[in-house]
Image (cartoon, helix red, strand yellow):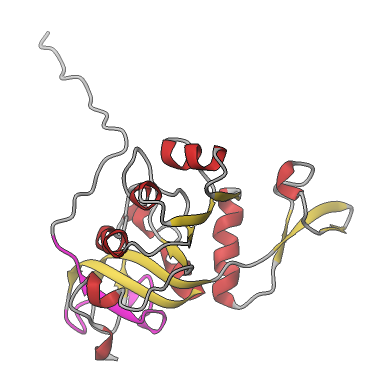
Amino acid sequence: MSGKRVADAGEALRDVFEGARIMVGGFGLSGNPEHCIRELHRLGTKGLTIIANNIGNQGKGLAVLLQSRQVRRAVCSYIGGNPDLEQQYLAGEVEVSLTPQGTLAERIRAGGAGLGGFLTPTGVGTIVAEGKETLEYEGKRYLLERPLTADFAFIRAEYGDPYGNLRFKGTARNFSPHMAMAAKVAIVEVDHLVGLGDLAPEDIHLPGIYVQRIFEGRDYVDPIEFRTTRPRPTAE
């Protein structure tokens, strides 16, 4: 179990291959596994299928993989704020599978749970339903959505121990636990690598059984998508 700990992203991504399917956790730029993304960019591995809520934003995060033409297919729920993906999609350079956000999350969860699919009314009667099987149950139409799995998952947690038990911070938790469950190899970078027993059992968001490799990250950038500030109150 303690063999899950690796030195850095270079060691963690040692066997990522061309054409791999990779799930990447976080929400927007929040909780991005920055070291894994930078290492994948450095490696130049191409033909990738990236499964994430959004494939970068404002030219940051996963957008660097688009800029280096490493992404072949994107499975996501949101393109807004990502001119790189927009331009490459319109040019026919990247295949994009847009999925409603809740459906995307449930497809990933279904993949991790070993389910064959699930029924949802979301998208019935829209272009989302094109090419998908529909069923009627108790007078209501549903789409049959298939599970998503991946070769690798890149996720970031705030705390982790050498066994891979994890605790996430805020919205950085979105998608990440289920992605680790749905991937063959879950690679985790943590802000703080703590000792065994330092995380209380009730504070663990994802048990280490779903994690294969873990390392501690340093010098995070943590970019902000839209910086908003409150005007300073004026003295009356």
Identity of the residue furthest to the right in this view: 139
- Please state the total of marks drawn on the protein image: 0
Depth check: give the residue in front, 78 or 159.
Answer: 78
Residue in the image at 43% along x and 36% along y: 83
Residue in the image at 13% along x and 12% along y: 234
Residue 199 on the magenta span: yes
Q: Quadrant of residue 192?
A: bottom left
Q: Which residues are magenta?
A: 195-218
Q: Examine the rendered structure and indicate whether residue 129 appears above or below residue 175.
A: above
Q: Position of residue 101 (x, y in %)?
A: 56, 50
Give the left or right position of residue 48, taking residue 236 as reference.
right
Image quarter in which the N terminus is found: bottom left
Residue 221 visible? The answer is: yes
Image quarter in which the C terminus is found: top left
Q: Examine the rendered structure and indicate whether residue 52 appears above or below residue 204.
A: above
Residue 181 on the magenta span: no
Depth check: give the residue in front, 90 or 151.
Answer: 90
Residue 160 visible? The answer is: no
Identity of the residue furthest to the top in this view: 236
Residue in the image at 54% along x and 39% along y: 91
Q: Position of residue 73 (x, y in %)?
A: 53, 56
Q: Position of residue 218 (x, y in %)?
A: 14, 62
Q: Quadrant of residue 117?
A: bottom right
Depth check: give the residue in front, 76 or 88.
Answer: 88
Q: Position of residue 111 (x, y in %)?
A: 58, 72
Depth check: give the residue in front, 3 or 48.
Answer: 48
